[in-house]
Image: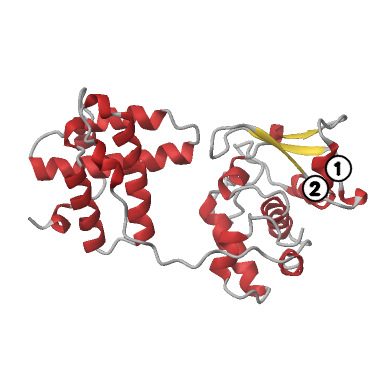
Amino acid sequence: MTASAEVLPAASPASGELLAAPGSLLAAGERVARRASAPSTRSTYLHAYRHFAGFLAARLDRIPEPADLTEEALLDFRDGLEAVGRARATVAKELSALRRPAAALEPEGVDPAAQRVRANAVGRRAPRALTRAELERLLAMPDRRTRRGRRDLAIMLLLGQAGLRRAEVCALRYGDLDELRRHPDPRRRAALAPRAVEQTGWVVHLRHPKRGRARAVDLTAAAVDALRVWTQSRPESATDHLFVSLARNRPPEQLVPRALNKLVAAYAERAGLAVATEQERTLSRSVADA
């Protein structure tokens, strides 16, 4: 049997409803997905479960059940994805999502050996954090005279200095900014900004972070100033998200993480940093010598 011929695209709405019938593998997987705290994680899980359920339905010619999630089935699914040219990182991401129901649904008959299935090794160079000088060069690229430049500077300061993830930046709303009169731990301010002049009482509240734990992140004076300038020039929008698109031919709307990839990569290339795609992956990490 050739697994690659069986790998299906995401199921259509009609077939998806059928695959998610009570007692099916997809229905069980969707229950697991709903427990994830981050919306992006839930979306990733749901995509993987629907893809795998469609693969099994074609292979078995019936609606798959939890007991059909076996080590052999996952190996065939993995080999099929690789055979049709899916990137190794994509394959690893889908398998990682599928191991979650494999662990959670063992009482419903899922093969525990399925948790051992991994993608073949992904050949990827370890990311490198920006140095302070590189970060300063990057932050000098946005044109502060323009609305777009003011927005992009605020975004990159949140990524580069506060260490927010792309999805966290995109999810920010006005109400997530807060000034604390008494900080619970002043040492946090000093860790972020060693010089007193760079410290502020402002924090940004992350309500739906990746691992589900809400937290407050301190902001530097530069980030607070950039946010103040941006909010003064932000266009009216139907959304109260802090950062919105600035396309000429459509109304402003919430930014998505892909947009942040592009804008950081463009500024990195303009700044002459080594590889733009590497910089966009590592900007949100702490500055190496901060």
- Measure how far apart labels 2 and 1 are at the Cα level: 12 Å
Please tell me which residue is depicted at 84% across the width and 49% down the height of the picture.
221
Q: Can residue 11 be seen here?
A: no
Q: Earlier in the sequence, mark 2 or mark 1?
A: 2
Please tell me which residue is depicted at 18% across the width and 45% down the height of the picture.
73
Q: Which kind of residue does numbered mark 1 sit on?
A: Thr
Answer left or right for 123 relative to 275.
left
Q: Quadrant of residue 188?
A: top right
Query: Could you tell me residue 238's position as x and y percent?
Result: 60, 37
Q: Quadrant of the C terminus?
A: bottom right
Above-or-below relation of 37 to 86: above
Q: In this rendered view, identify the residue nearer to me: 8 or 98.
A: 98
Query: Could you tell me residue 101's position as x and y percent?
Result: 32, 34
Disc assigned to residue 5: none
Colour scheme in use: secondary structure
Q: Quadrant of the N terminus?
A: bottom left
Answer left or right for 166 relative to 68.
right
* Residue wearing tag 2: 191
Q: Which kind of residue does numbered mark 2 sit on?
A: Ala
Answer left or right for 76 relative to 29.
left
Above-or-below relation of 84 to 199: below
Please tell me which residue is depicted at 38% across the width and 50% down the height of the picture.
93
How many neighbours does mark 1 have within 10 angstroms: few (below 14), some (14-19), or many (20 or more)?
Answer: many
* Residue wearing tag 1: 200
